[in-house]
Image (cartoon, rainbow, N blue to C red):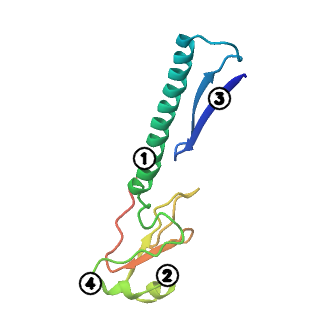
Amino acid sequence: MGRVELVLQWFNAVGAQVVGISVEVSERRQMGRREERMRLYTVMRASSIASSLLSLAIAGLLAAPASAQPPPCGMNPKDWCPAPAGDRCGRHRDAEACRADAACYGMRYRGESVIACILDERGFASNCPTVGCTSTPPTAPRR
């Protein structure tokens, strides 16, 4: 015969992990009882390890989506974040309507940007998206 190789492979959020198990099967010849038992033991042990690793891989894949949380609102330029409950500015569905209401302030974009967002006194940025509308004035940016 030759070499028999069993490879299990699974992927997770960090990257691919490959698990490999090799079993060497010698050429056909007359084997003694002891050799036959050892060969059977080796094959059974390898299949036991493989099934254990496969079970762990499946359990890990099933558990991963449950622990993954979506990013907080305001991290994506396309977000439109809800205002706090009872906030009258929460009725506005876009930045133009929010800007038109003098009592409302823009929620600043919190995602990544090549340059810092330049905000006016009401929280609307000239170079970043507005991601929500609220009646709470914006806080001064940290320096």
**Image point (49%, 40%), residue name:** 54
Q: Nearer the viewer, mark 4 or mark 3?
A: 3
Of 44 and 139, the residue lying toward us = 44
Q: Which mark is residue 59?
A: 1
**Dot placed on the residue nearer the N-terminal end, 4 or 3:** 3
Q: Secondary structure at mark 2?
A: helix
Label 1: how many Cα within 10 Å (few below 14, some 14–19, many 20+): few
Q: Earlier in the sequence, mark 4 or mark 2?
A: 4
Q: Which of the two discs, 2 and 3, labels the residue nearer the N terminus?
A: 3
Q: How far is disc 2 from disc 1 in space, using C-alphas?
A: 44 Å
Q: Which residue is mark 4?
A: 86
Q: Please name the amino acid that badge 4 sits on.
A: Gly
Q: Check disc 4 and report its element: helix, strand or loop.
A: loop
Mark carried by residue 95:
2
Q: Identify which amino acid the numbered label 1 is placed on.
A: Ala
Q: Residues within 10 Å of mark 4 (few under 14, many from 20)?
A: few
Name the mark nearer the viewer: 4 or 1. Answer: 1
Q: Residue at x 55, y 72 (%)?
A: 126
Q: Nearer the viewer, residue 69 or 51?
A: 51
Disc 4 from disc 2: Cα separation: 19 Å
